[in-house]
Amino acid sequence: MDPSLRLINSSPLAGGVSAQLTAIDAQQPDGRVDRLVLRQYGAANLRTDPHAAVHEYALLSLLHRAGLPVPLPRHADESARIMPVPCLIIEHIDGFPCTEASQLTAPLADVTGQLAGVLAQLHAAAFTLADAPYLADIRAIAARRVETWPSAPDQALSEPAVRTGLARIWPPPLLNQPALLHGDFWPGNVLWRDSTLVGVVDWEDAVLGDPLHDVANARMELCMAFGISAAREFTRQYCELRLTTDMTALRHWDLYASLRHAGRMSEWGLTPGDRKRLEAGHQEFVATALAAL
């Protein structure tokens, strides 16, 4: 990437599911140390987008210029000259995710308020397809998932009930201007330092479409991590910041969000206790979403 840098240290980073992450310390000629992150894309990412590295570099550049708290991209390579797979090198953000109540260092309302604030900032940025022509439309992705029933629906996550509910109301009405969406906005993709939100990471699922897709996904994840009251407070705070967002289709996107983890929890390496806790939170969210029908 940069022959003037001298490697000091490298170590694997935990948390990557769709990509392999490595932390790199490299010294500049003047003695300063760059803390970088190497992202090597997995097979699933590359099947969806063979140019994932270049596209994420372009997206992060766009978001960084707009003032969003995202990592500054430094280099993208899809030629396999640096690593055997396409890769992206970004600057490291010094922070930690907060995905369970025991990690909270601030009142929960402060946490949800900052999450709502950065998501509202993203959706207010008014990016268009011309800014990021490589991004897919979430409605097309969602339609395929809603229409394709698996051979063995996930009973623990109420998948049959969710799909039956979606079949009654899909597709959602088009009531909001399309926005650039993170696509997987949840506490695990947000970094904190001293109770302050300092970064939003893992943008490989970014899409264009109704901002309620991001809102619903955050609501589901907050319910799983902290309970339904956290999801409701986040929603109230987001609505206060985005008065022009029509929330009519939130029930559609809540149910769609409920499908995202179906059949996948076994891949996460969870302890039995953690899996039971997350499934209980998911069931609470699904029950609330179905009641809204």
Image (cartoon, rainbow, N blue to C red):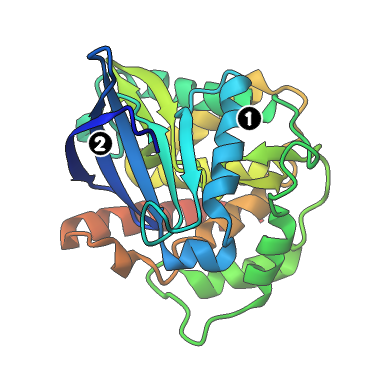
- In the rendered image, which quarter is residue 245 located in? top right
At x 17% / y 59%, what residue is drawn?
271
Residue for badge 1? 62
Q: Secondary structure at mark 1?
A: helix
Q: Nearer the viewer, mark 1 or mark 2?
A: 2
What x and y, as percent, mark residue 144? 68, 70
Quarter holding the N terminus is top left
Q: Nearer the viewer, residue 102 or 25?
A: 25
Position of the C terminus, as image quadrant, is bottom right
Determine the CA span between mark 1 and mark 2: 24 Å
**Vertical position of residue 201 compared to residue 139: above or below:** above
Q: Which residue is mark 2?
A: 24
Q: Amino acid at mark 1?
A: Leu
In the displayed orientation, state which residue is furthest to the front: 3
Sequence-first tag of 1 and 2:
2
**Image location (x, y in percent) of residue 240:** 64, 19
Q: Which mark is residue 238?
A: none
